[in-house]
Image: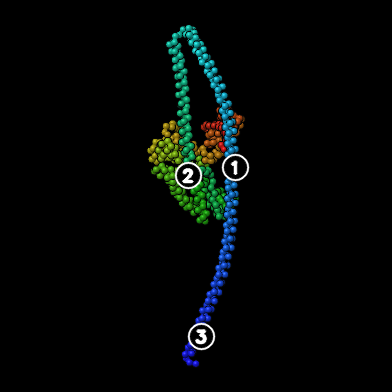
Amino acid sequence: MTSVEVTVLVALAALVGLIAGFVGARVQDRFRLTKSQADAKDIIARAEKDAQNLRKEAELKSKDEFFKKREEFNREIEKDRHELREQERRLEKREDTLDQKHQVLLKKERSLEHTQRKLHERRDQVEKRGQELETLLQEQTQKLHEITGLNREQAESLLLQRLEKGLSDEVAGRIQKHEEQLKATCEEKARGVLATAIQRYASEHTADTTVSTVDIPSDDMKGRIIGREGRNIRTFEKCTGVDVIVDDTPGVVIVSAFDNIRRETAKLALAKLIQDGRIHPSRIEEVVKETQEEMEKHILETGKQAVQDASIGTLHEKMVQLLGRLRFRTSYSQNVLQHSLEVAHLCGMMAEELNLNGQVARRCGLLHDIGKAADHEMEGGHPKIGAELARRYGETNKDVLHAIVGHHDDVTVDHVYTVLVAAADAISAARPGARRETLEKYVKRLEELEAVASGFPGVDQAYAIQAGREIRVIANASQTTDSDAVRVCRDIAKAIEEQLNYPGEIKVTVVRETKAVEYAR
């Protein structure tokens, strides 16, 4: 076979393969087309089915919304109908009320018309009676002129004289009343100043005693304090001037003396000896002397601190030392230095309330009892001794000197600062708890005062206030009247005067009160 034939065969074979491929491709395309058409029909069928489902769901949803809206509409309509019915009821009720008010107004109008008719009739009667009285008065005046023999001018002159005399008596009474009111106002103002000063100043007060206790580490120390044949305790008592009591009380030794300075010195010295452990006569004398020097320094520092606390300016060193000694002096168990500081502060506050010099007032108050620091060394009472000491140590202010010598009314009081010192001194000494045995008497007096007031009929409660200077009585409003309250107040005051003993005066206040409570709804 030649190459040409081979080439022809190859070409034929290629042509046959090409035709076969073409035919296969056409067959495959037709098959794909058929399949695509079937898929399209399925897709269209599913789409139509889904569309029908969606249409049905939309219809159902629209029906549900329609039903819901219709129900809401029905509820709103029912609510509006209910509101309308309520409004109708309220309107009907208001109409009834208006009708009732109208009826009441008609009744009032008829009553008013009736009252007006009566008033017109009464006015006519009064006018007629007035005319009759005027005529009768003229007749009586004419007869009076004929009887007395006085003409009009003479009668007027006589009447004016009598009127002038009556008015003069009334003027005198009014003047006396105003004077009493002025006196009461002054007393009230003074009480206000005192009350303000007391309220602004607050101080603790304690009661000092005549004995002090010293702790010891063990009861064996008691034997060392006593010493051989008692020589240690005798030496100690001789050096300090106190009594040392060593008894069966465990853990303490008692130091007794009426002089607080000696007692405090002995207490400190004994504490040093116990701490040191060397207790014998020579050591005792050394420690006591050292403690006395320390006590002098402590007294001076205490006086300086008091001067600084009171803000009174400069003071002689000897006066400062005397002030410090007052720290260890008591009066009716009240510490004199604390009392003096309290009086100073009260005087300063009251002086400032009265536009006076507060520093001068505090100086007067702080130094008013300075004589008590040396009244056992000099003759006379402490006011006289204090004034002499102040004058001796450079005090030149006459107000201060007069306050010291006259705060107990020993001399004629003609200085205002002396009055302030006397008032502050009384306040400081009279407060409950400031002095021993005052508290029990104070409480008992208040209880008696309240008991007297509570015993009267119509009294519900009674309270003693202002340290027993006033009794506040609460009267039963249903059992007493205003006039009864006045009578009960006077009777209580009289009963207090007859049954109780008390300083100064007691104000009785009866309170009768009626309360009415109502609620607006």
User: Would residue 377 be seen by someone viewing this image from the given angle?
Assistant: no
Q: Earlier in the sequence, mark 3 or mark 2?
A: 3
Report which quarter residue 93 is drawn in: top right
Apparent side of residue 243 relative to residue 355 in the rendered image (left or right): right
- Residue 35's disc is none
Q: Point out residue 238 in the picture as x, y percentages from the top left corner.
A: 50, 48
Number of numbered discs visible in the structure rendering: 3
Q: Callout 1: 10 Å neighbours few (<14), some, many (20+)?
A: few
Residue at mark 1 = 82
- Circle nearer the N terminus (2, 1): 1
Q: Name the residue nearer the viewer: 83 or 10.
A: 10
Q: Secondary structure at mark 1?
A: helix
**Quarter of the rendering containing residue 443:** top right
Q: Assess disc 2: are there few (<14), some (14-19) or many (≥20) residues with their C-alpha within 10 Å of its C-alpha.
A: many
- Could you tell me which residue is drawn at 48 percent across and 37 percent down? 195
At label 1, the amino acid type is His
Q: Nearer the viewer, residue 153 or 314?
A: 153
